[in-house]
Amino acid sequence: MRINGKKYRTIWYEDDVVKIIDQTKLPHQFIIKDLKTIKDAVKAIKTMEVRGAPLIGGTAAYGIVLAIQENKNLDFIKKSSEELVNSRPTAINLQWAVHRMNNRLSFVKSDELLDVALKEAKLICDEDVKFCENIGFNGLKIIEEIYNKNNKTVNILTHCNAGWLATIDWGTATSPIYHAHKKGIPIHVWVDETRPRNQGANLTSYELNEENIPNTIIADNTGGILMQRGEVDMCIVGTDRTLSTGDVCNKIGTYLKALAAFDNNIPFYVALPSSTIDWDIKDYKKIPIEERDSMELSHIEGIDEQNNIKRVLIYPKKSKSINLAFDITPAKYVTGLITEKGICKASINGLKQMFSKL
Ligand code: MRU
């Protein structure tokens, strides 16, 4: 999608380095950063210079490329793979991409490793673009139906950033929105601020602005009253890991939005590529939930009048806080899963019909 009218992907390989958009600097500074080593790739994922489940997967794939560029020794590649898998625990795309890269590389001759790894990393990213584009075509049908019924601007609520910045391009939750906008359907997006890191305000609103899509940032607790007032037609969110049972793990606060949507009879959709499905874990309590530094809660970052990015403390110095990054929305609150193959019920049968893997 576009920034300042120029088309970008979130990650690409050029002149032996991996290029990323440093998301810790958005929306105030647009900086393209070079990742040159496996350490750079691991750090980019840990510090959330790149974030969002599909983009973490893409970065991990290119991380393996960087590891091979440094050292073709199999023990080094194995150690690098482990470091990547351990860099963030919840989004399953990370381990999915690392396993896929390692499977592809097994039995490949040493002098061909780099070439094969590069092709596979590029393929993982290209596939993600195609899948997210298809999610858009599939989700568009729901938006069109609402528009044809009401014949007025469709109000969509989203949480966190499941936009193109969280993927390689298009986004998951935002892809149907971009497609609807292209088709001329009037859309307005309620963007949950998404404390503590404000991915909604800093990233989703930013990318929607760049595509001229009307949007309004709301505090995370505002969605409920908007739903009660009839000002939300549907919710679409992304996911970091969806179980074959249809239970959805996504950014903290998603669950409360789903409860409010359920209470107000508002459709609540989750958009995902198949790389985000965990086919193994059946019990959502077994999903590893990332706990991040409580500084992300107690401090806030912004820009001062001299355009310097500043971080300030907003809590009493002595107060304790806990920063759980994800929660679970049980399948019963999910109206449907919008995937690259179509829309299905958030259930074993729904996913079974859509994908043959179960
Ligand atoms: O902690 P983050 O910013 O990586 O969390 C991202 C999300 O929760 C997204 O909603 C999810 O990864 C879906 S991305 C298409």
Image (tube, grey):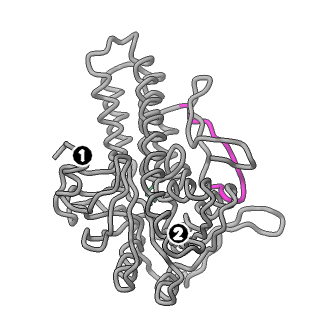
Q: Which residue is farthest right?
A: 306
Q: Which residue is mark 1?
A: 355
Q: Nearer the viewer, residue 85 or 123?
A: 123
> Magenta stretch: dominant SS?
loop
Q: Nearer the viewer, residue 343 or 126?
A: 343
Q: How many marks?
A: 2
Q: Nearer the viewer, residue 91 or 357?
A: 357
Helix, strand, or loop for circle 2? helix
Q: Residue at x 31, y 30 (%)?
A: 78
List x then y, in percent, for residue 151: 57, 73
- Percent across and percent down for residue 12 are 56, 34
Q: Is residue 34 magenta?
A: yes
193 relative to 212, above or below: below
Q: Amino acid at mark 2?
A: Tyr
**Disc 1 + disc 2, Cβ < 8 Å:** no
Ligand 1 located in image quadrant: bottom left
Between circles 1 and 2, the one closer to the viewer is 2
What x and y, as percent, mark residue 124?
42, 34
Pointer 1 or 2: first along the chain: 2
Say whether residue 23 is left or right of residue 344.
Answer: right
Decide: is 165 above or below 296: above
**Residue lying at 56% horizontally and 29% vertically, measured from the top left:** 13
Residue 27: x %, y % from top left = 68, 59
> Magenta residues?
24-36
The residue positioned 41% from the left and 74% from the top of the image is 322
The local crowd at label 1, few if under 14, some if 14 to 19, many if 20 or more residues have their Cα within 10 Å, is few
Q: Is residue 192 a member of the stretch shown in magenta?
A: no
Q: Which quadrant of the structure image shows residue 311? A: bottom right
> According to the image, label 2 marks what residue?
147
**Residue 55 makes an appearance in the image:** no
Q: Secondary structure at mark 1?
A: loop
Under mark 1, the amino acid is: Phe
